[in-house]
Amino acid sequence: MNELLANVDWYEIWLATLETFLMLGGSLIFTILLGLPLGVLLFLTGPKQLFDQKGLYSILSLVTNILRSLPFIILLIVMIPITVMITGTSLGVAGAIPPLVVGATPFFARLVETALREVDRGIIEATQAMGATTKQIIISALLPEARPGILAAITVTAITLVSYTAMAGVVGAGGLGDLAIRFGYQRFQTDVMVVTVVLLLVLVQVLQMVGDRLVVHYSRK
Amino acid sequence: MIEFFEVHKAYQLGKKSVTALQTTSLQIPTGQIYGLIGHSGAGKSTLMRLINRLEEPSAGRIEVDGLDITQLDAEGLRNFRRRVGMIFQHFNLLTSRSVADNVALPLRLAGELSKQAINKKVSDLLARVGLENHAKKYPAQLSGGEKQRVGIARALATDPTILLCDEATSALDPQTTGQVLELLAEINRELGLTLVLITHEMDVVRRICDQVAVMDGGVIVEQGKVADVFLHPQHPTTKRFVYEAEQVDENERVQNLAEVEGRILHLTFQGQATYEPLLARVAYQTGIEFSILSGRIDRIRNEPYGQLTVAFKGERLEEAMQMLQAAEVHLEELRHE
Ligand SMILES: Nc1ncnc2c1ncn2[C@@H]1O[C@H](COP(=O)(O)OP(=O)(O)OP(=O)(O)O)[C@@H](O)[C@H]1O
Ligand SMILES: [Mg+2]
């Protein structure tokens, strides 16, 4: 066993795992905080929706699409000056979180928009007929009704972020993906690569399972 | 009282404008069950949704108990909407909330009652619609009839004076439809709510409505007391609905008559006259003979009525007809001798 995994430094792996968790957790929180309101705004200003605003919707939609069409690796590099402005460094976990958030937020916002569109119009109408304000409609009807869809969106986004964190290694962010590239790929330490990849796989599996469970739990259909 | 003053509604579809409601004036008296019947696309939902301003009128004025609702600002409109309950064909319950939470929602949104007061009110409402044992369930765990009862309880939560029912029974089987209609009639009776009720079925109108408006192509083509409209339909659309309800085929009716001798009359009785032995009495006194070709005795809301197609023979037929007319039987000549 030790023979097979001769190059594996478990302490290093532990640190890298921790870094991945930090990057994932940090970026996911900010992605949700920014992406959820953006998704709601995209939905509300969309055609025939509560706040149908053609101009605003087109602008939001365009910005979202531009950010989504940018390859993440390019975003990482383009973002460096901005990242330094926000966090004071472009390195390490702190340096990775801004580009991760900017990369994932538009993606998540679109998923939220789609989840909200799935909500039966009749339910919005019924809530309107009760005399609800737009804010009440969003908080008391739209978001709870779209909860399974939003939870699924968070799951997909978290998993996407896992693969982004691996690329963030390029700017010296650390983490499991970085370890896989630096040792496994560049130094031909296949055992390190296998261990990190297995750990990433386990992480993705666990995220998917937890996400699915939550979706089922909150689906009352 | 709900009043429409020359209300017009057109939808804007891109550059095209589609008229859904032609200029319409209308009065719905307080405490009545007012039926709206018409084929698909006739403009029934549009008319109804103007009442709680889910749709804005393109022209005209709508007053509810003297309040011009077209002039209300956002807050005024929200307060007004609490006085107007609405139930839907597909129930439109929140799937993420339990039955009790669905019923509580309008009260929470209004934000006037304490939590305990809301809970108390919700259990009262659920008891009224017969769902006291289903409070913790989710809508997906209920049958269609039960879902509509939740919808009714929810619509009643803010003590409205008007209840709008857009095809509330169209998704239900006949027996459940009967139960839901019974519940609606009971609510109208006990709480004095004005009900506006959209349906495709004349039978629904016959069972619970006081008045009815028949719509076609965005126009109210006929309106009045249900008994009058039902028993003496004037407009072709109304006739179609009535014959559909009675399952009468107009062509068949005329064909069958060809084999019978005598003068054929269509007799309509209403109220007390329905149960009196009028025909026998008239036959006895005038010596005419009659044979009944088809007939139906039923009720409109709670008033009995009868419709008979009868072939008459005899010398003193004119006299007999006068006697029937004197007894308030409506006569329609289907075939002269
Ligand atoms: N939001 C809308 N935008 C454009 N046109 C509409 C809209 N709602 C209704 N219409 C049109 O207005 C007309 C009347 O529609 P309405 O929904 O009032 O009919 P209805 O009598 O309720 O029909 P149904 O029995 O099928 O419910 C139809 O021609 C319909 O296509
Ligand atoms: Mg309709």
Image (cartoon, rainbow, N blue to C red):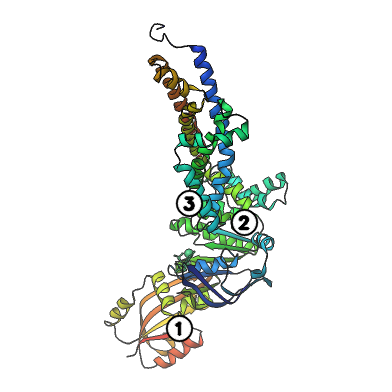
Q: Quadrant of residue B39?
A: bottom left
Dot 3 and dot 1 within a common chain: yes
Residue A69: x percent and y percent? Answer: 44, 43
Amino acid on which the number 1 mark rests in the picture: Arg
The residues bearing labels 2 and 1 have C-alpha atoms spaced at a distance of 58 Å
Q: Residue A119, can we see it?
A: no
Which residue sits at x=44%, y=76%? B238
Q: Please rate how many residues cluster around mark 1, counting C-alpha atoms within 10 Å: few if below 14, some from 14 to 19, many from 20.
A: some
Sequence-first tag of 3 and 1: 3
Asked whether the residues under the numbered discs 2 and 3 touch, taking CB atoms below 8 Å apart as contact, a structural biologist would say no
Task: Give the label, 2 or 3, closer to the camera.
Answer: 2
Task: Give the label, 3 or 1, closer to the camera.
Answer: 3
Residue A36: x percent and y percent? Answer: 56, 42
Q: Where does label 3 land, which residue?
A: B144
Residue B330: x percent and y percent? Answer: 47, 84
Quadrant of the image containing the C terminus of chain B: bottom left
Q: Is disc 1's CB within 8 Å of ligand 1? A: no
The residues bearing labels 3 and 1 have C-alpha atoms spaced at a distance of 50 Å
Q: Where does label 2 land, which residue?
A: A130
**Residue toward you, A47 or B323:** A47
Asked whether the residues under the numbered discs 3 and 1 touch, taking CB atoms below 8 Å apart as contact, a structural biologist would say no
- Chain identity of mark 1: B
Which residue sits at x=67%, y=49%? B108
Q: Which disc, if any, is residue B281?
A: 1
Quadrant of the image containing the N terminus of chain B: bottom right
Q: Please rate how many residues cluster around mark 3, counting C-alpha atoms within 10 Å: few if below 14, some from 14 to 19, many from 20.
A: many
The kind of secondary structure element at disc 1 is helix
The kind of secondary structure element at disc 2 is loop
Q: Spot the residue most to the left.
A: B259
Amino acid on which the number 2 mark rests in the picture: Met
